[in-house]
Image (cartoon, grey):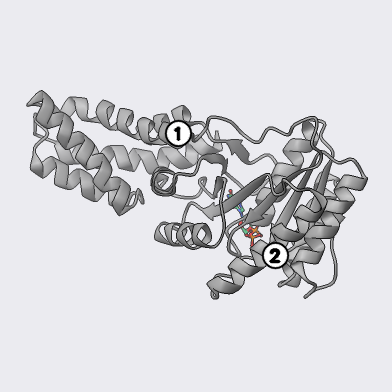
Amino acid sequence: ETLDKGLEKSNRSFFDKIGRAVAGKSKVDDEVLDELEEILISSDVGVETTVKIIKMIEDRVAKDKFMSTSELDQILREEIMKLLAENKSSDSTFEIPESDKPYVIMVVGVNGVGKTTTIGKLAHQFKQQGKKVVLGAADTFRAAAVDQLVIWSERVGVPIVKQGMGADPASVAFDSVQSAKAQNADVVLIDTAGRLHNKVNLMNELSKIKRVMQKVIPEAPHEILLVLDGSTGQNAFEQAKQFTAATEVTSLAITKLDGTAKGGVVIGISDQFKIPVKYIGVGEGMNDLQPFDKYEFVDSFFK
Ligand code: GDP
């Protein structure tokens, strides 16, 4: 419902803009396509994906010789759905297997995007599914990050593994995975520091964390979840670029879609980086993390 509220706001304006672009026109022509291009870009869909969508529509216009403006919504909707499907967005959320314990989810992203909150919300969901969860506070760079995660561990009621401020993140990750294994936990969520100012450092730090976790669980991490703030537009694209250059990323969580008037980031980032969007954040509370549902998303985009 919150998603609907937030997205409705955004999507009403998206829808209104398209309405304005085609007002008084019966046919999708170059002028309409130019305006559509601007609308997609201003909705944070990103240049690359916008160009791709426009090209798809041009091709359809060329093939059918004519496209009425009244069909445009439906065709856009189909094309966006196709893009999301190609990247397997919304196919599934994290499935924690019964065997191979613990399932290791490493969570990356820059400070402030909602990384800690997303970890807390995920821990809550897993716990509700009857899973035994452990949190690992490997973002040792900021004291506040550890404090925040401690608060979430208390709120949700799951154990946390931490060390002092400034401790080696890899050492915390190692302890966390080992402790989760000893407790026969189902899943361990590892928070990491998101310092982007030095790409080589970030890369080294993340690969060291991975390496030491693999001493305990050779398959770890099973997932590398990148958290992005959906309300930051181009910044989110830039972060996706930097993180995917520094590490493999297996899935995305896009937060703060309750507050944004531009849900287009979800479409653009998933398409450009070929990574499935698994979760969306729609508020600050424990229950405000939803599995990404492309049908619902596209529906509200065009409402
Ligand atoms: P981190 O630095 O990446 O760990 O970010 P935090 O998890 O501490 O979140 C930063 C701020 O964003 C906090 O005030 C959170 O309550 C807020 N936040 C996180 N996710 C969402 C969301 O989906 N919607 C809204 N409205 N706020 C969020």
Whether residue 90 sits left or right of residue 187 in the image: it is: left
Residue beneath the point at 27% across and 39% down? 16
Of all residues shown, which one is farthest toward the right? 182
Residue occupied by mark 1: 297
- In the rendered image of this protein, does residue 150 appear above or below residue 36? below
Residue 32, image x, y percentages: 13, 41
Residue beneath the point at 47% across and 54% down? 231
Residue occupied by mark 2: 208
Asked which secondary structure carries label 2, the reply is helix
Whether residue 39 sits left or right of residue 192 in the image: it is: left
Q: Is residue 122 visible?
A: yes
Pointers 2 and 1 in contact (CB under 8 A)?
A: no
Of residues 175 and 84, which is closer to you in this image? 175
Q: Quadrant of ligand 1?
A: bottom right
Residue 82, image x, y percentages: 36, 31
Q: Is mark 1 within 8 Å of ligand 1?
A: no
Of residues 155 and 207, which is closer to you in this image? 207
Q: In the image, what residue type sits under mark 2?
A: Lys
Quarter of the image with the C terminus in it: top left
Residue beneath the point at 54% across and 71% down? 199
Of residues 5 and 29, which is closer to you in this image? 29
Q: Is residue 67 visible?
A: no
Q: In the image, what residue type sits under mark 1?
A: Phe
Q: CA distance from mark 2 to mark 1?
A: 37 Å
